[in-house]
Image (cartoon, helix red, strand yellow):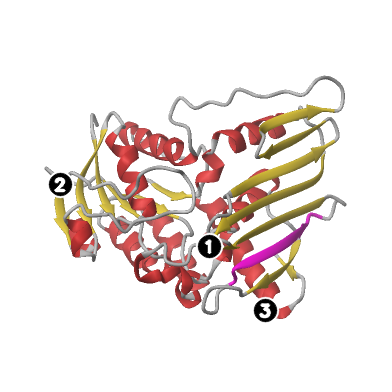
Amino acid sequence: MKEVRIGLVGLGFMGTTHWGIYQAMKGARVVALADVDAAKRRGDVSKVVGNIGGGDNSKPLDLSGVTVYESARALISNADVDVVDICVPTPDHADIVCAALAAGKHVFCEKPLCRTEAEMKKIVAAVKKAKTCFNLGLCVRAWPEYRHAYEYFKSGKAGKMKSATFKRISPSVDGNAWQNWYMDGARSGGALLDLHVHDIDEVNYFFGKPKSLTAAGANIVSKGGIDHVVATYDYGNGALVMAEGGWAAAKGTPFEMSFTIVCEKATLKLDASGYHIYPVKGKPITPKCDVKAGPTGWHQELAYFVACVKKGITPDKYQTIDSVETTMKMLFAEAKSIASGKKVSL
């Protein structure tokens, strides 16, 4: 396959981010677009805002040569579409993912996988049945600094992990999305599902499924969602693993994504000063991360997925459906722990 033809569903912050990445990517082209918003179907994304990235996601889009649809179902029926890229509100993921896979399309879906455990089971079954490629936008696995830390840790160079802390704090996302759906906890699940999921996934990615976990959460700005959460993960080995995330900070607050992984031989740390490795013996190291596919995890994950589709191989560098399912099970376990105030076994 010389060119991968993309059908993009949804033109919010992530949809416009994906659009911009595809425009600069060799061997990929957006040939179809679906959005329920008539203005966006004309390329008017002036109301699109985000909480990270610094890009100009509100710049008008040139939709010349792009077939435009009001519904995802109509786009899926387009025979010219190889990949359906889904960037819509979480409750709509399951139906669109399953319909696209059933139609024989490759599917890239933004995180989180779904809103409920029932939807998770439905999607997992559909992915395992499909003969096409599927990946989820858990972009932090592909983020250059996180990826380097992962490879360094897995190589054994840092030694045994003693403690690990992952943190993700966002300025308020109130007003940042279509119909302000982030602020409807029944739809978004709050920061627990839409933000903290990244660090749940990093805990899973680095260390695997814990034996149990305990989480505390607070509803601060949304209607019924968990807007800030702190969780600890028990691996039964005495190590302390924690993740914290929230999106209730003031609008002017800088976005924070950080980690500190303390190991026997070195500490791996990402903060506002950058990404560094601090060996127990020797001088600090500032690694050179692989950014050939792009500077962010969004660039890296999409470039890899398109390459897999083009080559006809199953994407497994960053994730598999089994690892995604584990992350979602951990997420739903956190929700249960927050509701009950008790430790939850996995």
Q: CA distance from mark 3 to mark 2?
A: 46 Å
Asked if the magenta segment contains residue 234, the reply would be: yes
Measure the C-alpha gap from mark 1 to mark 2: 33 Å
Q: Which residue corresponds to the image point at 56% horizontal and 64% vertical from the top-left?
A: 191
Q: Which residue is mark 2?
A: 66
Q: Which mark is residue 129?
A: none
Amino acid identity at mark 2: Val
Magenta region: which residues? 226-235
Q: Closest to the observer: 239 or 288?
A: 288
**Viewer can see residue 15:** yes
Q: Badge 2: few (under 14), some or many (20 or more) residues near its Cα, within 10 Å?
A: some
User: Can you see residue 76?
Assistant: no
Query: How far from the left and from the top, in percent, is residue 197?
Result: 57, 58
Q: Secondary structure at mark 2?
A: loop
Mark 1 or mark 3, earlier in chain: 1
Q: Amino acid at mark 3?
A: Ala
Q: What secondary structure predominates along the stretch shown in magenta?
A: strand
Query: Is 94 placed left or right of 239 in the picture?
Result: left
Q: CA distance from mark 1 to mark 3?
A: 23 Å
Q: Which residue is mark 1?
A: 172
Task: Answer whether residue 73 is magenta in the image.
Answer: no
Amino acid, disc 1: Ser
Labelled disc at residue 339: 3
Residue at horizontal 49 percent and vertical 48 percent from the top: 52
Image coordinates of residue 41 in percent, x first then y, are: 18, 57
Image quarter where the C terminus lies is bottom right
Q: What residue is shown at x 53% (from left), y 74% (from top)? A: 222
Front position in the image: 208 or 164:
164
Q: Secondary structure at mark 3?
A: helix
Residue 170: x %, y % from top left: 57, 56
At horizontal 15% and vertical 46% (from top left) the residue drawn is 66
